[in-house]
Image (tube, rainbow, N blue to C red):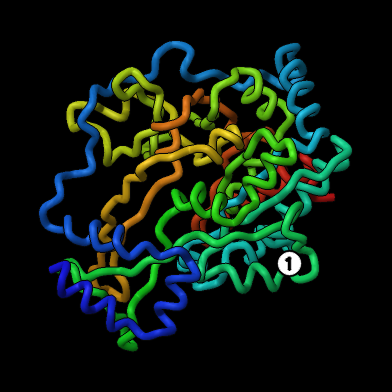
């Protein structure tokens, strides 16, 4: 199969190769991943998995408490020094909002997701006296529209864009999948691209060299996940390389959960858990919001796991390979922070599609007003 696939790669149109190369396509890795189709074992981890140990998951202190104020002082100092940056995941293939780039969708009347993110950074700068860098990881599908929306504002430092990787979809048999027009079908290869893409951009090394210490990583559509003095303070105070935010499960919520794998605190998606482990025994799950030591991320050398994902394009089955940002916890020492998911203090307001946006608009507006992102 691989020889046939190699020939197909050799025969790709030159413009497709140009696009892939511009997005750091790794041909040899792609061939290795394709070669395992049909023979790979499942994605489940092989080590010993058990629930989090006491102390692995901490609660964010209540606002107004002495501990919340203590942590806020630590975080406020770091933000005022300019040693904290926000990195927003704004990539993907722009398929869930009717083909419109989500950053440019109106989350509130006359306010797009992107505009609300910018406003939240303005409000933070007013509170702490300094603007934190905001970097957006875009994709081939979202980059041009996002850059156009930020025309004249991008400075490559305080406000910057870098692109995630790009790959090819395959048929279940392992051939290059062609879309209805006969063109190779391209796909973004998951939010786990962020560490490598950020390093390749040069933003991370410059930030660290200038004294940067902490990165917050969050989904564009989770407008509850804002830079917060107490959360930054919690991360800096415990001293480990990573903090992963979690929230209580409600009903049938599913997602990556904090566990101990061979006695190491990590996030594991449910499809990676051994069949003998019941994910319902862990009543919190990962929000995909992280605080990470910037130098540890810069120096990180890890062999990422690319998962085989089965999807459909126009009703036709396809296979693609993706990596997940949560795998950072398998390589960086991590503490988990349980944060609110309701009320004005909510740090979890995900919006995957128009229906969820309609259901959450009132919450989004209340949170944005409370934090100064909406006047």
Q: x, y (%) of residue 361?
A: 64, 52
Q: Residue at x 76, y 52 (%)?
A: 158
Work out whether 41 lies above or below 175. above
Q: Residue at x 78, y 38 (%)?
A: 82
Q: x, y (%) of residue 223?
A: 64, 47
The secondary element bearing badge 1 is classed as loop
Binning the other alpha carbons within 10 Å of mark 1 as few (below 14), some (14 to 19) or many (20 upward) gives some
Q: Is residue 205 left or right of residue 276?
A: right
Q: Residue at x 73, y 47 (%)?
A: 133
Work out whether 268 lies above or below 324. above
Q: x, y (%) of residue 235?
A: 62, 25
Q: Is residue 343 left or right of residue 31?
A: right
- Residue 177 picture quarter: bottom left
Q: x, y (%) of residue 346?
A: 63, 36
Give the residue number, with chain letter if any, for mark 1: 150
Residue lying at the far bottom in this picture: please name it.
181
Q: Quadrant of the N terminus?
A: bottom left
Tell how many labels: 1
Work out whether 84 lies above or below 203. above
Q: Residue at x 21, y 70 (%)?
A: 171
- Residue 328 picture quarter: top left
């Amino acid at each position: 199969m691989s020889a046939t696939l190699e020939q197909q790669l050799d025969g790709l149109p030159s413009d497709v190769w140009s696009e892939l190369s511009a997005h750091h396509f790794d041909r040899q890795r792609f061939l290795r991943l394709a070669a395992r189709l049909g023979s790979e074992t499942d994605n489940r981890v092989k080590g010993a998995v058990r629930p989090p140990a006491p102390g692995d998951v901490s609660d964010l202190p209540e606002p107004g408490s002495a501990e919340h104020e203590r942590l806020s002082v630590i975080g406020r100092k770091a933000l005022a020094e300019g040693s904290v940056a926000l990195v927003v995941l704004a990539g993907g293939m722009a398929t869930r909002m009717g083909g419109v780039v989500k950053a440019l969708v109106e989350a509130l009347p006359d306010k797009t997701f992107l505009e609300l993110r910018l406003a939240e950074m303005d409000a933070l700068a007013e509170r702490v006296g300094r603007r934190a860098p905001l970097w957006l990881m875009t994709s081939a599908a979202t980059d041009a529209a996002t850059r156009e929306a930020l025309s004249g504002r991008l400075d490559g430092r305080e406000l910057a864009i870098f692109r995630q990787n790009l790959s090819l979809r395959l048929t279940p048999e392992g051939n290059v999948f062609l879309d209805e027009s006969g063109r190779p079908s391209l796909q973004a290869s998951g939010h786990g691209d962020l560490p490598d893409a950020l390093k390749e951009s040069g933003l991370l090394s410059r930030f660290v060299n200038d004294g940067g210490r902490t990165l917050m990583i969050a989904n564009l559509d989770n407008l509850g996940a804002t830079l917060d003095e107490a959360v930054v303070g919690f991360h800096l105070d415990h001293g480990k390389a990573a903090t992963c935010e979690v929230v209580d499960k409600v009903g049938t919520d599913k997602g990556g959960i904090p566990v101990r794998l061979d006695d190491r605190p990590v996030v594991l998606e449910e499809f990676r858990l051994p069949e003998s482990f019941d994910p319902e025994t862990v009543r919190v799950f990962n929000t995909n919001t992280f605080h990470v030591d910037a130098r540890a991320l810069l120096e990180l050398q890890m062999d990422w796991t690319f998962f085989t994902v089965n999807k459909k394009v126009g009703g036709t089955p396809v296979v693609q390979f993706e990596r997940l940002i949560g795998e950072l916890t398998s390589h960086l020492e991590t503490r988990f922070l349980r944060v609110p998911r309701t009320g004005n203090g909510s740090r979890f307001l995900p919006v995957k599609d128009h229906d969820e946006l309609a259901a959450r608009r009132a919450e989004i507006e209340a949170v944005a007003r409370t934090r100064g992102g909406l006047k």
